[in-house]
Image: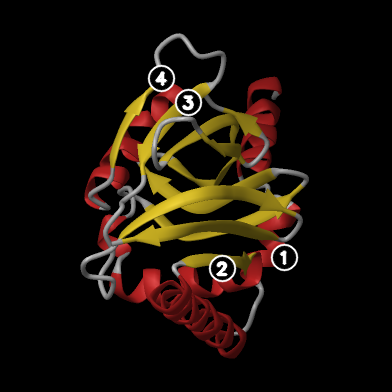
Amino acid sequence: LLLGLGLFLFYRAAKHVPEFYRQAIVSSPEQQQQFGEEFKKQLADLQSDVEKNQRFETILSEDQINGWLATTVAQQHAHRLPKGMREPRVAIQDGEVRVGCHFRRGKLDSVVWLIADLDLTEENNTLEIRLRGLKAGLIPFSIERFQEQVTTSLRRAKLKFHWVAGAEEVTARIQLPERFEGLEGKSVQFERIELQSGGLLFSGRARK
């Protein structure tokens, strides 16, 4: 009886859906499409600013990011996600981002989520991301168990990165690209990337 009760409670804890994910996933297809189009327009306007003024700054809202994840990523880039992952969503608040997704692999079928924060380092176009608090529902997991999936996803995105040895938290340093499609002959220098309440801000300048 105790074993059965324990298994039931474990099952319920694994099936728990965090509130941020519950809110992010309920958008209608029409809303997702609208926010996804806003995301792409923001980037198009950003490219135009770079071409005209050399400098750029924009804020992508979490709704726009989630709309892009629900449409463009789901339809065109799902193969780049770690195996077993679907419907990734984010929530940004107080300098942190919560990232969640449905994850199914083996006996695990749950909403897996974690907390991350990030900063630009002193190295050119290098972004440091610190990961912590990985859970499947309410059940804590070791982030190290999922590093292989994260590594595969970053490699599929063709990003250069390395894991920082000896860091207090699981930390990755990602080399952001300097060249982008549509900006031939210019290199991009990121000067500021911040997690603000409800959005992601980034700014910088371009050089010939």
Q: Describe the element under mark 3 as helix, strand or loop.
A: strand
Mark 2 and mark 1 residues within 8 Å of each other at the beta carbon: no
The structure residue drawn at horizontal position 43% and vertical position 23%, both measured from the top left corner, is 144
Question: How many C-alpha atoms fall within 10 Å of the one at disc 2: few (<14), some, or many (≥20)?
Answer: many
Disc 2 marks which residue?
Answer: 66
Q: Describe the element under mark 4 as helix, strand or loop.
A: loop
3D distance between C-alphas at marks 2 and 1? 11 Å
3D distance between C-alphas at marks 4 and 1? 33 Å
Give 15 or 19, whichever is nearer the viewer.
19
3D distance between C-alphas at marks 2 and 4? 28 Å
Res 148 seen here: yes
Give 115 or 49, whichever is nearer the viewer.
49
Foreground label between 3 and 2? 3
What is the number of the mark on residue 171? 3
What is the number of the mark on residue 164? 4
x then y, percent, for residue 67: 54, 75
Mark 3 and mark 4 residues within 8 Å of each other at the beta carbon: yes
The structure residue drawn at horizontal position 49% and vertical position 32%, both measured from the top left corner, is 121
Give 55 or 63, whichever is nearer the viewer.
55
Q: Describe the element under mark 2 as helix, strand or loop.
A: helix
Give 44 or 89, whichever is nearer the viewer.
44
Foreground label between 4 and 1? 4
155 relative to 178, above or below: above
Question: How many C-alpha atoms fall within 10 Å of the one at disc 4: few (<14), some, or many (≥20)?
Answer: some
Left or right of residue 1, residue 111 in this image: left
What is the number of the mark on residue 23? 1
Q: Mark 3 is on which residue type?
A: Thr
